[in-house]
Each structure stands twice: as structure tokens, then as C-alpha cells.
Image: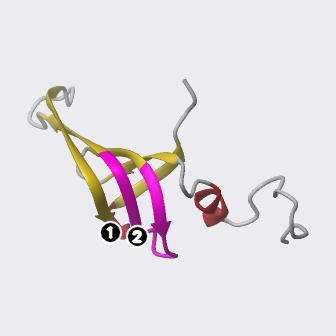
Amino acid sequence: MSSPEGDAPSRPDEPLDLVRLCLDEIVFVKLRGDRQLSGRLHAYDSHCNLVLGDVTETIFVVDEEDDDDEVKAITRSHSEMLFVRGDSVVLISPKPQG
């Protein structure tokens, strides 16, 4: 159920409504393969394909031979614009304030 025009929605009705509310905001995206992204959400579609700007990518290198799955290294990189294919997305979250 959508709210009347001009009123801000009180809560998301559909799962992707939360993503729509995050357009032009900073989001946190968890990906398969021990990767995380943080950047400004410019666009998305129903398959969770994303276009992010001013993106910081964090890659965690995990030693899977050990039982404790200890992180061995962390690599960070920066991109001005990035397309993320939806089948690699595990989680999309608004960036916490502070």
C-alpha cells in the first residue's frame, strides 16, 4: 500500500522499498567472497543490480585451512563508480549514522 503523494512513507511495504529509500544515500553492501562495499547508491533494479558512487571496497583474506577462519589480510580499494551484479549481493543496509 503506497502513501498519498507528498507524504513520506512510514515504513517499507516491500523488501526493495528499503533500498528505494536509500537512493542517493551511503549504503553498506555485503558480497559473496568475503567482500564489503560502502558507497552512495545511485541506482538499482529488481535483481539487486546496483550502481554505486564513491565506493570503498574491503576484501578480507581468510585462511580457510584453519578451524577458526582467521582473517589473514584486509585489502581496501576506492572507485569513483561501480556496477555490482545482483547475484553477488548478500545484504544491503543503510549506513549507520556516526
Asked if the stretch drawn in magenta spans residue 28, the answer is: no
| Quarter of the view holding residue 20 | bottom right
Main secondary structure along the magenta-highlighted residues: strand
SS of the residue under disc 1: loop
User: Horizontal and vertical percent for residue 19?
Assistant: 58, 59
At x 91%, y 69%, the residue is: 4
Residues packed near mark 2 inside 10 Å, few (<14), some (14 to 19) or many (20 plus): some
Sequence-first disc among 1 and 2: 2
Say whether residue 33 is left or right of residue 61.
right
| Quarter of the view holding residue 58 | top left
Q: Which residue has dot 2 on it?
A: 49
Q: Where 37 sits versus 96, above or below?
A: below
Image quadrant occupied by the N terminus: bottom right
The circle drawn on residue 85 is 1
Say whether residue 15 is left or right of residue 42.
right
Foreground residue, 27 or 24?
24
At x 81%, y 58%, the residue is: 9
